[in-house]
């Protein structure tokens, strides 16, 4: 038997599954512990799906399940001790869930082993995990659908978690999370599971809308911003990941200390928010997408705060400068504890002893085109479409990754006709956000809405255009979707788009390994999902046709 089995991300080994060690660096033990954590969370869900939404005391269980799932997404947490602790805590939360169900007279008649298995003996965790992982579902289509739901839920949990940090909670999202997680243990038909996949997508829309509300009500609407990509002479802290509350607290705590703050990868869009732009010591963005961190963290010189995914196994040369917080973690890396106001003093003191960052790039990039800002430009955009100055919008949202084949996205962006506008979100943008793509009558040809969750903004923009042009079908808009995926946040974005009725999405650089041939067929037949080919070929079929 394999030491592990994981195929949740795009870079999975041989395009089929990681079985010895993850391409991401996750080892067999951590992978198995993640499987076991998911198992106990499923057991919890089998109680929680019956607990009324207004039941007193459910919030802690909701939070724990959401947080637990978030820790298992690709490149979030690699710390085995964290997972052992989470598994034991999960059993305690499951007990709370059982008591809640009992109190409300809704204890299910049927039991499942995940509802009763006890983590009494740590030495038995791995053996148990080997029995309950992905491959424990034998039918490959059912397995495929269960995992598609599960990965969508992981992405959904991550977005709901970011919103929760800003005190935006939606009990219906939590209730659905348990219902869907519970469903993955049941004997459902392929049709029932397919319906659940779409329902997961519709809750993905809700979670992204909730997060959009949380972010914009706390920090204002993103606005067009030129972001400096060079450096200054002070020591700096680099902040990565997606958690804007951490960003806020770090900026506050570093003010007046002589330490500058730079964003990295998915934190770049923090530069677009009015509440953050006002800080004089907030310099700009350093580096590129997550997978280049092993080089860029070396030249940054100062400490790095990883607030969420994507962390990659740190090199010894800079490991002592990495700090994690929230759902992120790595063995031997310092972790900043959760608190209403987190204490970043250790990282600030650390920064003061470091050299200033080495400049690796100079200039500016432009972003901040979330829905509110684009609506301000709506008249201009509509006129440009009507006059033919803009022929097409191409949504190129999603993730970046290591594979050489992703150069496709740089070439694709570069070769698009000059009357096409790219709409982007997520770290996929680093493949082309430093190209000089120009503008169309003052409208930049690359409109960056923000983080991957801000794909919600792209959907809002599409729906607004549909209304303006009085179309009965969103697919009649001159919009093409050429999306790059890597981890499970991209899975929920994809499912969200499908639930909104968007068809003919191209997904690359490869289709998910967790789609069985039959499930892939269902997606092709019902939604027109396709892969990518060569730039020349795709330019012909998507853009010039
Ligand atoms: Fe492999 Fe991706 Fe799973 Fe890591 S997350 S073990 S790379 S499939
Ligand atoms: Fe990137 Fe990890 Fe997906 Fe939020 S940071 S998009 S890969």
Image: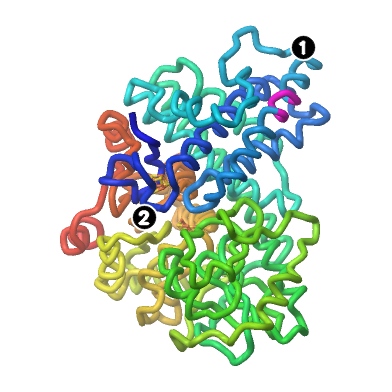
Label of residue 483 in the image: 2
The quadrant holding residue 334 is bottom right
Which of discs 2 and 1 lies nearer the camera? The answer is 1
Task: Give the spatial CA distance, label 2 vs label 1.
Answer: 46 Å
Q: Is residue 362 above or below residue 96?
A: below
Q: Residue at x 48, y 80 (%)?
A: 299
Q: Which residues are magenta?
A: 92-96
The answer to whether 419 is drawn above or below residue 343 in the figure is below
What mark, if any, has residue 131 been given in the picture?
Answer: none
The residue at the point 76 percent across, 61 percent down is 342
Q: Left or right of 168: which side holds 287?
A: left
Expressed as whole percent of the image width and height from the top left, the position of residue 210 reads 65, 49
From the viewer's side, name the closer residue of 316 and 487.
316
Nearer-the-camera pick, 252 or 357: 357
Q: Secondary structure at mark 2?
A: strand
Residue 105 in percent (x, y) is at 77, 12
Q: Earlier in the sequence, mark 2 or mark 1?
A: 1
> Residue 455: within the magenta?
no
At horizontal 60% and vertical 20% (from top left) the residue drawn is 117
Give the main secondary structure, helix, strand or loop, of the magenta stretch. helix
Q: Secondary structure at mark 1?
A: loop
Q: Name the residue nearer the viewer: 473 or 490.
A: 490
Q: Residues within 10 Å of mark 2 (few under 14, many from 20)?
A: many
Q: Which residue is mark 1?
A: 105
Q: Is residue 44 above or below residue 244?
A: above
């Amino acid at each position: 038997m394999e030491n592990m089995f994981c195929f949740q991300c795009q870079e999975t080994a041989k395009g089929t599954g990681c079985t010895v060690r993850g391409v991401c660096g996750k080892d067999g033990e951590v992978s198995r512990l993640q499987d076991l954590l998911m198992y106990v969370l499923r057991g919890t869900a089998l109680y929680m799906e019956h607990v009324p939404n207004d039941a007193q005391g459910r919030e802690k269980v909701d939070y724990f399940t959401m947080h637990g799932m978030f820790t298992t997404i690709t490149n979030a947490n690699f710390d085995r001790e964290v997972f052992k602790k989470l598994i034991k805590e999960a059993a305690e939360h499951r007990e709370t869930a059982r008591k809640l169900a009992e109190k409300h007279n809704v204890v299910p008649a049927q039991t499942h082993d995940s509802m009763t298995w006890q983590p009494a003996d740590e030495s038995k965790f791995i053996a148990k995990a080997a029995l309950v992982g992905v491959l424990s579902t034998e039918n490959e289509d059912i397995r495929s659908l269960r995992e598609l739901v599960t990965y969508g839920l992981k992405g959904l949990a991550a977005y709901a978690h970011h919103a929760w940090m800003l005190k935006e909670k939606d009990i219906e999202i939590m209730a659905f999370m348990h219902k869907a997680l519970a469903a993955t243990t049941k004997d459902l038909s392929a049709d029932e599971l397919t319906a659940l996949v779409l329902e997961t997508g519709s809750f993905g829309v809700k979670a992204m809308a909730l997060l959009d509300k949380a972010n914009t009500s706390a920090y204002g609407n993103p606005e067009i911003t030129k972001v400096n990509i060079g450096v200054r002479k002070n020591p700096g802290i680099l902040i990565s990941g997606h958690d804007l509350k951490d960003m806020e607290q770090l900026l506050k705590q570093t003010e007046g200390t002589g330490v500058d703050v730079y964003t990295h990868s998915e934190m770049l869009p923090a530069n677009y928010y009015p509440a953050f732009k006002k800080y004089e010591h907030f310099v700009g963005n350093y580096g590129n997408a997550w997978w280049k961190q092993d080089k860029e963290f070396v030249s940054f010189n100062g400490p790095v705060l990883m607030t969420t995914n994507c962390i990659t196994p740190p090199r010894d040369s800079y490991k002592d400068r990495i700090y994690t917080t929230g759902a992120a973690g790595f063995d031997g890396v310092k972790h900043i504890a959760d608190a209403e106001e987190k204490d970043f003093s250790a990282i600030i003191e650390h920064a003061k002893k470091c050299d200033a960052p080495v400049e690796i790039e100079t200039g500016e990039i432009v972003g901040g085109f979330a829905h509110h800002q684009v609506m301000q430009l709506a008249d201009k955009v509509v006129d440009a479409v009507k006059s033919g100055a803009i022929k097409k919008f191409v949504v190129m949202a999603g993730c970046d990754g290591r594979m050489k084949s992703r150069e496709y996205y740089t070439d694709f962006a570069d070769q698009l006709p000059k009357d096409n506008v790219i709409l982007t979100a997520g770290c996929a943008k680093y493949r082309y956000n430093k190209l000089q793509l120009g503008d169309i009558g003052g409208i930049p040809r690359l409109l960056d809405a923000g983080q991957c969750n801000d794909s919600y903004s792209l959907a809002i923009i599409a729906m607004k255009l549909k209304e303006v042009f009085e179309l009965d079908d969103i697919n009649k808009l001159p919009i093409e979707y050429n999306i790059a995926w890597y981890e499970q946040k991209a899975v929920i974005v994809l499912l969200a788009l499908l639930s909104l009725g968007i068809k003919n999405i191209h997904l690359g650089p490869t289709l998910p390994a967790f789609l069985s041939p039959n499930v892939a067929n269902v997606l092709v037949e019902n939604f027109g999902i396709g892969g990518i080919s060569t730039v020349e070929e795709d330019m012909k079929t998507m853009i010039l046709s």
